[in-house]
Amino acid sequence: MTDPLLQVEDLSISFPSANGPVRIVDGVSFSVGREVVALVGESGSGKSMTGRAIMGLLPSRAKVAAVRLSFDRQDLTALPEKGWDSLRGSGMGLILQDPKYSLNPAHRIGRQVEEALLLHTKLSAAERRERALDMLDKVGLPDVSRIYSSYPAALSGGMGQRVMIAAMLINRPKLLIADEPTSALDRGLQDQILTLLRSLSEELGMGLLLISHDLQQVSRYADRVMVMRRGKIDEQMVSADLANAKSDYTRALWAARPSAATYGTRLPVYGEQP
Ligand SMILES: Nc1ncnc2c1ncn2[C@@H]1O[C@H](COP(=O)(O)OP(=O)(O)O)[C@@H](O)[C@H]1O
Ligand SMILES: [Mg+2]
């Protein structure tokens, strides 16, 4: 058996507070191969901090401990800052919720899509442009040479998110971490983007860690799901087994199906008093 791409063993993260350190991720273990794995759980359960720890992007106040944190056989617990820079530019990519905060309004799309190539490869300007146009096309954008020379303000939210995906994938990362990648988009676009991420991960042989609060939605795109609650992984299973989940928490998340009637209203939060 080949090693998984990402191995996380007994990861804990805490923040200092007036009453001593507060543990927000507590003994989390999992691995991700060239597959789509969803990390789900209600807001505040520790999903984003887990994703940031894997990318080396935690706030400096955070204290991290892990028995093992390795990516592509590299030990991340001992990686110097330079190693992180090259890993983030070539091995791993991160997509966040809202393209408005990820794209720089002052720079043309082309330059932003090409940035990883500029920093981490020796490709010529013409080669970079060609790769960028090709990637913009792959993520389903129309009229790519016009988009290439446009500024972010000219794009809709859905187009902006596609541009972000293109920028993250252009240097062929082995693993993409997508943290609530569609939460800022309307429902129809969400499905389009998730379908796109799923098919690109298959096409490029890339691992995908899909972080979301919406178990119902992401389980349709993931091979496996890991359910996180209060800093721990409560249950892990293949998506097909979700209907038979053992944990009450997973069952509650699974039952919280957004329907036409509840869409746009707040869904019940497990353990919350009404
Ligand atoms: N900078 C910080 N300092 C202290 N606590 C934080 C900080 N950022 C997040 N937290 C806490 O960490 C917990 C987990 O946050 P997060 O990983 O963002 O949750 P999720 O992504 O699952 O919604 C939350 O309870 C949050 O309040
Ligand atoms: Mg989050």
Image: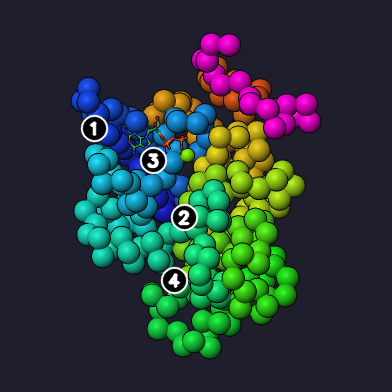
- Magenta residues span 258-274
Contact, mark 4 vs mark 1 (Cβ under 8 Å): no
Q: Is mark 3 within 8 Å of ligand 1?
A: yes
Q: Quadrant of residue 152?
A: bottom right
Q: Residue at x 27, y 40 (%)?
A: 62
Badge 2 is on which residue?
94
**Disc 3 residue type?**
Met
Provide the secondary structure element on which disc 3 rests. Answer: helix
Q: Of the residues shown, which amino acid type is indicated by label 4?
A: Ala
270 is within the stretch colored magenta: yes
Instruction: Please name the residue that numbered disc 3 is placed on.
Output: 49
Q: Are marks 3 and 1 in contact (CB under 8 Å)?
A: no
**Which badge, 4 or 3, comes first in the chain's sequence?**
3
Magenta stretch, main secondary structure class: loop
Q: Which residue is denoted by mark 1 in the rendering?
A: 16
Marks 4 and 2, the one that precedes in the sequence: 2
